[in-house]
Amino acid sequence: MGQRLLPQTLIDLYAHALAIERDAFKRFVELERFMRDAGMDYLAEEFERIGKEEQEQYEALALGTAERDLPQLESWEYAWHYLGAGADKVAAPKSARDALKLALSTERRAQNFYVDVAEHANDDAVCAFAAEMAADEQRHIARLEQLLAREPENVKISDDDAEVLLNK
């Protein structure tokens, strides 16, 4: 049986965190644009705020590691925790609830990764940084769960609007 490859050094964790935060930022930009196109500005604004937080996190990591030689991540290294490379291919949301669930999935996957690292790394600095990143993801999860709880179940987005996200 193969062993999971979790980052064991800060440099390795930084490389993973950069990839995770960059992907989350891109996802929230897509969701924000999709919600605006569907006329759901209240959700678009929240996605925009979370996206900006993801972008700021990414930029802080990039700035902090600019002088370092970060390891190249192979697709299989990054995908194992996320159920394979195909897990990122998602259908366009058909409702605001679908968009919120997609956003939650993005945040939960990142949080699960960071929690896994925090629980299994041998280095205290790696554990602490991973735990801090998991806590950041939890704040986003809580906000998204509140929005999901308030969102009615029967509001659908037109198929024409759904095409916009699929074609990006």
Image: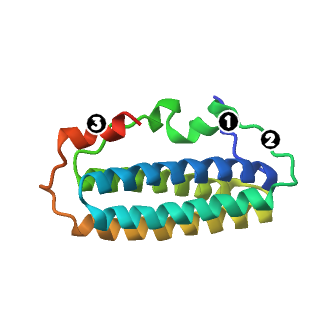
State the image coordinates of residue 33 (x, y, percent, origin top left): 37, 52
Are the two marked residues, 3 and 1, in contact with CB atoms closer than 8 angstroms? no
Are the two marked residues, 3 and 2, in contact with CB atoms closer than 8 angstroms? no
Q: Which residue is mark 1?
A: 3
Label 3 or label 1, whichever comes before in sequence order: 1
Kindly state the secondary structure of the residue where label 1 is placed: loop
Label 1 and label 2: CA atoms lie apart by 19 Å
Residue at the spot 59% in from the left edge and 58% down from the top edge = 115
Residue at the spot 55% in from the left edge and 47% down from the top edge = 23
Q: Nearer the viewer, mark 3 or mark 1?
A: 3
Identity, as a three-letter code, of the amino acid under mark 3: Glu
Q: Using the image, tell me which numbered label, if any, was put on residue 163.
A: 3
Identity, as a three-letter code, of the amino acid under mark 2: Pro
The correct choice, above or below, for 23 with respect to 50 in the image is above
> Crowding near pointer 3: few (<14 within 10 Å), some, many (20+)?
some
Q: Is residue 55 left or right of residue 130?
A: left
